[in-house]
Amino acid sequence: MDVALDRAIGVFWREGYDGASLAELTAAMEITATSLYAAFGSKRQLFERAFTRYLAVDMAYAARALDQPRLEDVFHSYLLDAVDSMTRDDRPHGCMSVQVGGSRTGLTPTGNEVRDFVATARTAGLQRLSSRIEEGRDVEGFDLKGATPANIAEYLASVSNGIAVRAADGVGRAELRVVAEIALRALLSR
């Protein structure tokens, strides 16, 4: 099941939800359309299962970042591990969440529902990051320099999403790590 979902992730990541045809999905997953419907119910349900797996596996770096002991370590892990994840050789470069949640999805009513599903997942992740920043501010006394935890979370997500777009454009890991380091220096400068 995980192998089939990983293959579906690749198709959705490259093609978007609306652009991913049943023929492409079944060929990549090495199953028939009948088997796809029997196992997953529908293309949308397949997408939701694949995206949930993507969050758990490919975006596991975000959850690991939130578990770092110091807020400064959270920031470093969040951005630098994002670069590494988004430039893996065994996956399309960039971020499935950014790719699928963008212009290649939302061309159909179901595509709009999928885009909303992805946006809801991104918002939940942003809220978890904001809560962790709030905790770091309150427990560690981390100085946010007048920004709110939500502002800092939005900043980190925006930098990460920009890195995802540039990774998908073919910018390499080394250059994107420099970008992440610049963002970290700006965030952490005292």
Image (cartoon, rainbow, N blue to C red):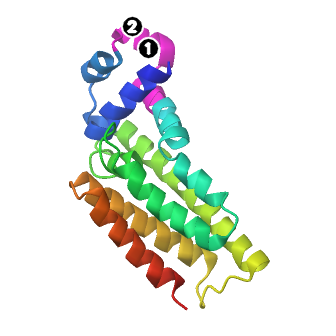
Question: What residue sits 44% from the left and 14% below the top?
Answer: 37
Give 165 or 45, whichever is nearer the viewer: 165
In the picture provided, is 189 more to the left or to the right than 9? right
| Callout 2 amino acid | Thr
Estimate the x, y position of residue 40 in percent, counting from the top left.
49, 19
- In this view, 173 is above or below 158: above
List the residue tagged with mark 1.
37
Give 1 or 85, whichever is nearer the viewer: 85
Question: What residue sits 33% from the left and 46% below the top?
Answer: 106
Range drawn in magenta: 30-47
Estimate the x, y position of residue 30 in percent, counting from the top left.
33, 13
Residue 124 seen in this snapshot: no
Query: Marks 1 and 2: CB-CB under 8 Å?
Result: yes
Q: Residues within 10 Å of mark 2 (few under 14, many from 20)?
A: few
List the residue tagged with mark 2.
34
Question: What residue sits 51% from the left and 54% below the top?
Answer: 122
